[in-house]
Structures are given as C-alpha cells and as structure tokens.
Image (cartoon, grey):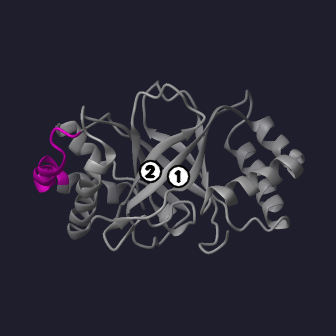
Amino acid sequence: MKKVLMVLATGGLICTFATSTALADSHEEGGLDHASPIELFACSYNEGKGPADLDKAVDGWNQWADKHNQTHYSAWTLVPYYSSPEQEFDVLWLGGAPNAASLGRGQDLWLATGGNEAQGFNEALNCTAHSNFATLQFKKPPERENPNNIVVSFSDCNMADGVVFDDLVPSLMEWAKYRESEGSKSGMWVLFPAYGGGGEDFDFKFVASWQNLEEQGVDYDQYNQSGWKKGNELFQGKLDCDSSRVYLGTNRRMGAPDSG
C-alpha cells in the first residue's frame, strides 16, 4: 500500500497541460465535468536520426498548423528520465484538444493535407504505438513561470475487487484538496484508455506534472513526512498502482483555451 501512496504523492497526475485545452478542468463546485481526449505516440529514432531531426519535423508541423489555423491542438514531447528497459522508445508525443470533435477535425485535416510535413516525422521517427485516452482533471496546477519545460509522471493503476471508479472519486477529490493545502504545485489527472490499446493490464493511468524536479521533490518529502497518513485514510484497500515513470517534457504547441 505504501507504494500506491508514493505514486499518489510523487506521481501526481498531468501539468502545465492545465494551461492547454487538452486537459480541461474536470472538477467544478465539487463535481466532475466532461472528459477531454489526448493522443499518445510512442516513438524511437530511426538509425542516424536524433532530437535535431525531430525539432526540424516539429517546425514544419507548426508551420502547417499555422497555415491551417489549427489553434485548438496542444502538444508536448516527453523523454524518459526515471525509467526502465520496459520503456522501449526514445520519445513520447502527447497531444490533445478541448473535445474529441475538434481533435478529430484536426486529424482529418492533417491526413488530407499534411503529407509533406508528415514525411519529416517519418524520416526521424518510427512510432510503434498510437493510443487515445479520456482524461479527467482532479487538481489544476498554478500557472508556470516556464510553461515550455515540465516534469511528467505516469503510473498504471488497478482498482481493488468490488471497487468501481465512482467509489474513488471522492477520495481523489479529497486527496487533491489535501495536496493543495500542503502547497503542492502539481496537477492531477486520471487517463482512461479509449482507443488503440486492447488487453490493458490497468484500469487507468495516474499522471502528474511539475515545473521541475525540485517541485516534484517537495511533494516527495511532504509525503514521507506526513502525507502517507492521509493517503492511507483515503486509499487503503481501494487501489494498486505500479512505480511511476518520469519524463522531461517540452511544449511544442499550445492551443487556445476557448478554441474548438
């Protein structure tokens, strides 16, 4: 159980993404709002290619997005920091929009008109997975001094037998309020698999972000000092999560909050 609580303390749930349209605020006046969609690509560099080649492809993609007035889509690239050999990729692409219709509209346009720009990505990367998640936000982080660089953590979680997600919602909300009262600057989200998977061995992903590793460390210390007691109170016997993977994130495009 202590492993689960460490995940909740230091694995939070996603980040400066809160300033984007991809992860909309999902708790208003004590209740959950709608889920927002995100897409995730897992990619490795082709032989002889590296970050500079990805940067070039992203520049071309941003020019395409500007030309076609794609103001709704936000994106980050994530590179492993705390990881294991099980993370068999070099970089993750995480993107999203305010709702699934606007995400799909942009995807349709990219497939129809982005062939030249897509070639830049194909030359740099081999992406072996493309998945979609429905995202609920439980804690909105403060505005970042530097929204272009963040730290993001992912953990896979399973609910105990007989527990459904509705049973966890009050505990997650209370945990978010507790973390806020203790000065945590993380954001907290839950990601449910929607498309592109099949046979998942988890019920949802618990994701968090911070401005930097020091902010993450502050939450780590607070948990070790006293946060584990509150975590025990809220989650004992309800949830089992694996160790968090931590990534260093770079913003590639920030969508306008009110665009659709």
Q: Which residues are magenta?
A: 223-238
Quarter residue 60 falls in:
bottom right
Q: Could you tell me which residue is drawn at 64 percent across and 72 percent down?
A: 256
Residue type pointed to by label 1: Gly
Task: Describe residue 74's horizontal placement relative to residue 159 as left or right.
Answer: right
Q: Name the residue that disc number 2 marks.
A: 152
Q: Are marks 2 and 1 in contact (CB under 8 Å)?
A: yes
| Nearer-the-camera pick, 242 or 58 | 242
* Quarter of the image where the N terminus is located: top left
Lateral position of residue 124 relative to residue 15, left or right? right
Element at badge 2? strand
Look at 56% across and 63% down and name the residue there: 148
Q: Which mark is residue 62?
A: none
Spatial distance from mark 2 to mark 1, Cα to Cα?
7 Å
Q: Which residue is mark 1?
A: 249
Relative to 201, does residue 193 appear above or below in the rendering? below
Of helix, strand and loop, which mostly describes the magenta segment? helix
Q: Residue at x 14, y 49 (%)?
A: 228
> Which comes before the other along the chain, label 2 or label 1?
2
Q: Give the answer, above or below, for where 243 lies relative to 227.
A: above
Amino acid at pointer 2: Val
Residue 75 position in % (x across, y down)? 62, 56
Q: Residues within 10 Å of mark 1 (few under 14, many from 20)?
A: many
* Rendering coords of residue 27 (x, y %): 38, 66
Residue 115 drawn at (x, y percent): 88, 45
Front residue of 88/128: it is 128
The image shows residue 154 at horizontal and vertical percentages of 41, 43
Tell me if 93 is positioned left or right of 231 in this view.
Answer: right
Magenta stretch: residue 244 in it?
no
Residue 225 in magenta? yes
